[in-house]
Amino acid sequence: MKTPRLLDIHNATVYRDNKKVFDGFSLSVEQGQSTAIIGPNGAGKSTLLKLLTRELYPVVNDESHVRILGQDRPILWELREKIGLVSADLQQGFVPDVSGLGVVVSGLHNSIGLFHYQDVTDEQLTRGRAVLEELGISDLAGRPYKQMSTGQQRRCLLGRALIHNPDHLILDEPTSGLDLNATYHYLNGIRELLQRGKTILLATHHIHEIPPEIERVVFIANGSVVADGYKADLLTDNHLSSLFDMPLTVSISNGFYQVLPA
């Protein structure tokens, strides 16, 4: 039996805030095929990821579909156990007084904090502490979310995404707002997950945050896929200059790409 695709979008029309973002949009991503979605702000990257997390739905049409892990209508709870998410929207909306451990454990309850009506078990807390230790941030277990740096918050949210041990991770602008130290510490953690076999779908306009382990890149502009292929073929001066509509030059160091004005 053929393994279902992680994401299979065909001829989808999608609105966001009453604005049509996609019109006849198609893209597929296989399980195990880590991919970077690249494009300028407003290109449709976040909309694409929200389709995958079912925060947005396409216009119903017999000639189109959006399938996730082979299902047209996946059960959301089961989906969230298989696909972890880290995004700026999630980070900004989190309850400020929850502890680092609470942030991680909230992933088991699909909530943006822990609340009195939730049944948080000792087993769940033990799992949360194990994730914090695995990420090297056990010292954040008792620290309130509002007292953490942006990078510390992001690492706790990564723990939240990993608490179910999902095979797939969605990262939306994962290093946005981080300083250099936090950026590269975070990227090292992402690289370790890739090397352990996690499938990562990364949406970004920061070329330097694409880990060397990700080989496929997809360019999106104005709600359409404008290029799709190997990183070495597409992350070039000409292609990136065209995508971002300005003259750019590309350099490569230790598998990471860096873009500067030409």
Image (cartoon, helix red, strand yellow):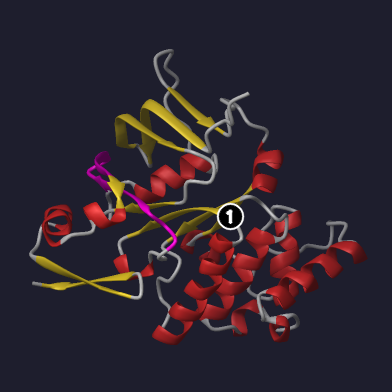
Q: Main secondary structure of the magenta part?
A: strand
Viewer-closest of 128 and 144 = 128
For label 1, the SS is: loop
- The quarter of the image holding the N terminus is top right
Answer with left or right where residue 181 lies relative to residue 237: right
Among all residues in the image, which is located at the extreme right? 122
Residue closer to the observer: 138 or 98: 138
Residue labelled with disc 1: 198
Q: Is residue 55 visible?
A: no
Question: Which of 21/171 is in front?
Answer: 171
Note whether 185 is above or below 201 in the view shown: below
The C terminus sits in image quarter: bottom left
List x then y, in percent, for residue 96. 63, 74
Give the residue at x 56% y 62%.
195
Q: Which residues are magenta?
A: 213-228
User: Can the viewer see residue 2?
Assistant: yes
Please state which amino acid type lies under the numbered disc 1. Lys
Q: In the displayed structure, does residue 42 sit left or right of residue 87?
A: left
Residue 68 x %, y %: 55, 34
* Furthest-top residue in this view: 62
Residue 156 x/y as whole percent: 63, 72
Q: Quadrant of residue 76?
A: top right
User: Would you say residue 156 sits in the magenta stretch?
Assistant: no
Q: Is residue 230 above or below residue 69?
A: below
Disc count in the image?
1
Residue occupying image coordinates x 63% and y 31%: 74
Query: Which residue occupies 74% across, 80% down?
Result: 141
Percent across and percent down for residue 206 are 31, 66
